[in-house]
Amino acid sequence: MRNRIHVIGAGVGGLTIGSLLAKNGHPVEIFEKMGKVGGRTASTTFKNHILDNGFHIMPFYKKSAIFEILKKLNIEANLNLAKVDNIAFYSDSGFHKYPKGISDLLQLTLIPFSSRVKLLRILLPMAFTSMKKTEEWDNLSLTEITKKLDVNTNAFFEAVCMLAFADTADHISLGEFARTMIRANPFKGGTSEFAYPSDGGYDAISRILQGFVEDNRGKIHLNSQIKRIIIKDSKVEGIITQDGTFHHSKCVVISLPAYQAINNLFEDDVFDQEFIKKVNCLDKTTAVVEVHFALNRKIDSKQIVFPVGDFTTKGFFFISNITPSVCPPWEHLMIAGTPVLPEEAENQKKIKQIVENMKNELSSIYPDFEKSLLWERPMAWKLVESVVKEPGMVWKSKMPHQISHVEGLFFVGDSTISYGIGTDSAAHSSILCHPKIEKFLQNSS
């Protein structure tokens, strides 16, 4: 009889690793504390509009790790994708086309021609280097190469960082940025196009994976929080759920942020303090204010607009231009967002001011915005940004997939070793971790 595998968390990380294991015939059970799958990508319905918990997007379109897993499972046809490539920058001089290739960069009207040439000299070597080489740059900040550029070109870099990382350039590792350039390089099999589920709601990906797990005799337990992971003689014995039930297992896979799991799910003597201190460095918090706006008319045909310069808003995402499935007919849905300090996400006065700034900026760009507005729904939230894009804190400094002194314990998700960020990082982590779990299961059978 095959060993039962318990996976903690039904976000993208937990569902992708669960699906890969179920495909190979392993009995898989996934435990999720929330009432539905998706984790941080879970969506809600409000006034017949599908609202994502933040704006999520599949990077690099069908070259992404998520799509690679769907192909491995032979279910890629189950996910209908809308291509997201109608992207623009907005500055005082108007709209500028988002560059998707070298020729586009040369024609980038946002910056002077001489600056475009300098930009190419920076970006071309990155795009054609190796992934291995980029690891040497992980301790450097992206600003090491941008600090000598002119104001307009630096503003361009900031806008690109908002698109690729939802963060500012000074928080991004040069290595992480270079890896993004490589994955977007069509000459190396990449693409700079993005995708979003045509049926609306980014958690459509998670629901498809959920279906695969259940169709392959796996189980997903919703509203089931884990209280403790039991380790005995340096081996996994099983898990205890919040209701006190013990579930025996020799293999447990954790897809929660690593520092949360290490600090909350184990007895004190499982890990030494030096290891815990290292893992706790992954405890980074991102705070965001985002506002969904419902409109009675289409104020722009573009899908995404990134303001460049001194704007409160860092991105406008016209979700209904990507897919009309997110809202009722004749209505249009968009979301505007900006990163904030963690304390600002809890300050109602500050949130209200940010929302007003966003509305003023939208009105200055789109004169019909105010009279088209049907309703607005602000969200302010703090998120454990366990992917850690900061210089010195990426790639090999992330959580390892397994720990040598605990047999049968594995970690996946965007806090673990992987290339990429967010949901695609979580999926790539599963691709890297899956062979390690299979080897363990084979040796322990």
Image (spheres, helix red, strand yellow):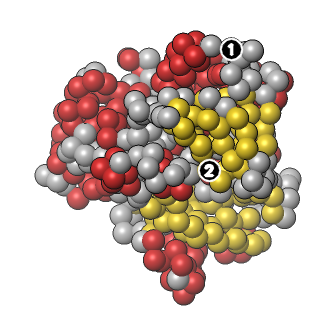
Quarter holding the N terminus is top right
Q: In the image shown, does 130 or 382 lie closer to the viewer?
A: 382
Residue 228 image label: 2
> What mark, if any, has residue 264 been given in the picture?
none
Given the image, on which type of amino acid does mark 1 rest? Asn
Q: Residue at x 81, y 58 (%)?
A: 45
The residue labelled by disc 1 is 24
What residue type is disc 2 on? Arg
How far across and down, in percent of the image, does residue 418 sit? 43, 33
Q: Is residue 310 visible?
A: yes
Front in this rendered view, residue 267 or 386: 267
Q: Is residue 360 above or below residue 436?
A: below
Query: Residue 400 placed where, x, y %?
Result: 41, 35
Residue 340: give x, y in percent of width and height: 45, 69
Going 44% across and 38% down the picture, which residue do you hit? 416
| Disc 2 from disc 1: Cα separation | 27 Å
Q: In terms of sequence position, does the residue under pointer 2 or pointer 1 come before the other? A: 1
User: Mark 2, residues whose alpha carbon is within 10 Å: few (<14), some, or many (≥20)?
Assistant: some
Q: Is residue 328 above or below residue 404?
A: below
Identify the residue shown where x is 74% and y is 23%: 27
Q: Under tag 1, what secondary structure? A: loop
The residue most toward the left is: 148
